[in-house]
Amino acid sequence: MNNLIPLIIIGIFFIGIIIIGKIASMKVKNSDDYLVAGRSAPLALIVGTLFATFWGGGTIIGATGAAYNEGVFGVIEDPFAAGLALIIIGIFFVKILRRLNIKSIGELYTMRFGKATGYLASSLMIPTYIIWTAVQLLAIGKILNILFDINFNIAFLIATAVVVLFTYMGGLVAVVWTDTIQMIIIFIGLITILVIGFRTSGGIDNVFANAPEGFWNFLPRGKGIVPWISYLAMWAGMALGNVPSPDIAQRAFMAKDENTAKKGMIMAGVLYWIIGFIPIIIALIAITMVNTGIIDHSLFQGDSELLIPYLAKELLNPVGLGFFVASLLAAILSSASTSLFATAVLFSNDIYQPLSANRRKYKKIKDEDKMILRITKIFVVVVGLLSAIVGLTSTDIYDLTIFAFTLQFGVLFFPFVLALKARWVNTYGVISGMLSGLMVNLIGCITQLSIIPEPWEFFTLVPALVNLTVTVIVSYCTRKKINNNGLLTDNNYEK
């Protein structure tokens, strides 16, 4: 009976999300509405959707567990490095991306280096976002399993069905609408658990007095250069790995103008830093409760990522538990729907559409637009299924999150920057660089049978450096064999 009330509240939340998707679908008239929300979003909507997109299962569930074990230093990658990515994009890349008038980041590589590079870049982005979607679905499965003893696989599949359904119906319009609503729910839930947590733990002063030695360390403590190399890898993997992300680029494309896109990115990044301290403080509340005997640390000793679900179960009454879990699910679903949709667009807009262009060249534009809309919806379902498969093969949320974006850093960061900033880089160089960076990562994963091979600093930094080196050398050696084929026009290109 105790579980019935929170489950009813969560069920109403799920139904509400699906209804929003249905309402959003009524506003979708063409592929522009579905893929980039009509390019008319105001500043508040951009900030809200970016924050809700980043504030997912990896941050709430994963970062709280990491902070419990290692303090602030354990969560440098997310939220701090991840938030920096938004600020970097806002300052350096939004302006030129907006002027390209494209619907997906994969189109950049096609425009700059030709179709083959576009196919390759889009294909290499897809694994990152399938993993990222799986991470969010895993978080939902863990929460519902621990709190309500619902079978993990059933909870996981319900979450998959809900996110696929409302994303399928409304596209980016549905994603943005639900993001905005979910951001409000997120704030309410986090403030609730903080207030009750402080009160149960003896007050703010007592909580901060229980901080272990070194808990607030933001910089490496070891001597020599090795700790600083590790520190650099922590920042680079997530901060720079997020820069070429298709979901972030879509937010730039959907803004009503350049200035709105730029301000929205920077404001969302700063907000993410500020709110990012909440999981850290929640971890400290848990440490205090363990130290004072209020809760038994053995409850989550085997998996510190279960910390928040256990805290919620201990601290909240059934109604409060229902609303708090709904706020957690709101955060997680917003990230899941964003990554799901971004991946579907990569499939449909950047791979399927160009490959099928010859068969469509005699059809009317109206028919083509309907076809893009239909195919993108199909790929929303396909990506949902692939993410479910990935999620069922691994349960380590934080490691999967870090792996997804360090892979993207090694393979796509420098090609993205060079595509926008360097006229002398050519197709041969970029393709060689991408494949070289990918190869270094694959060698580590295969030889060690691990998604995070050791030394992890090497497999974070070296693939990107190999990528850049190979790109520069090959571009230089082949500079006379091409004639700037595929370069952006001077009207769009920023020197």
Image (spheres, helix red, strand yellow):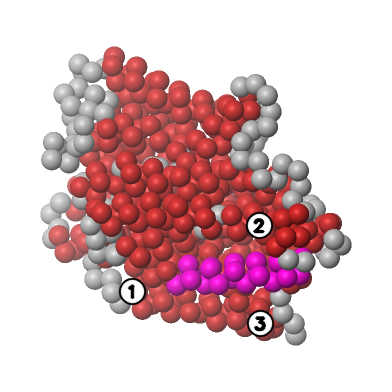
Q: CA distance from mark 3 to mark 2?
A: 23 Å
Element under label 3?
Answer: helix
Give the answer, above or below, for where 65 lies relative to 452: below
Q: Quadrant of residue 312?
A: bottom right
Eyeballing the image, is 106 above or below 490? below
Q: Position of residue 1 (x, y in %)?
A: 75, 85
Expressed as whole percent of the image width and height from the top left, the position of residue 481 reads 21, 18
Which numbered disc, 3 or 2, marks the residue closer to the eye?
2
The type of residue carrying mark 3 is Val
Q: Which mark is residue 281?
A: 2
Dot 2 falls on a residue whose secondary structure is helix
Q: Which residues are magenta?
A: 181-201
- Dot 1 surroundings within 10 Å: few (below 14), some, or many (20 or more)? many
The dot on residue 25 is 1
Circle 3 sits on which residue?
Answer: 319
Amino acid, disc 1: Ser
Q: Residue at x 21, y 32 (%)?
A: 495
The answer to which of marks 1 and 3 sits earlier in the sequence is: 1
Asked if residue 130 is positioned above or below residue 373 in the image, the reply reads above
Indicate yes or no whether the magenta region holds residue 186: yes
Q: Nearer the viewer, residue 421 or 206?
A: 206
The x, y position of residue 117, in whole percent, is 31, 35
Q: Compared with residue 103, is residue 203 higher up or lower down, i.e. above or below?
A: below
Q: Is residue 348 visible?
A: no
Of mark 2 and mark 1, the one earlier in the sequence is: 1
**What residue is drawn where x is 47% and y is 48%?**
83
The prevailing secondary structure element of the residues shown in magenta is helix
Q: State the image coordinates of residue 86 (x, y, percent, origin top left).
A: 41, 48
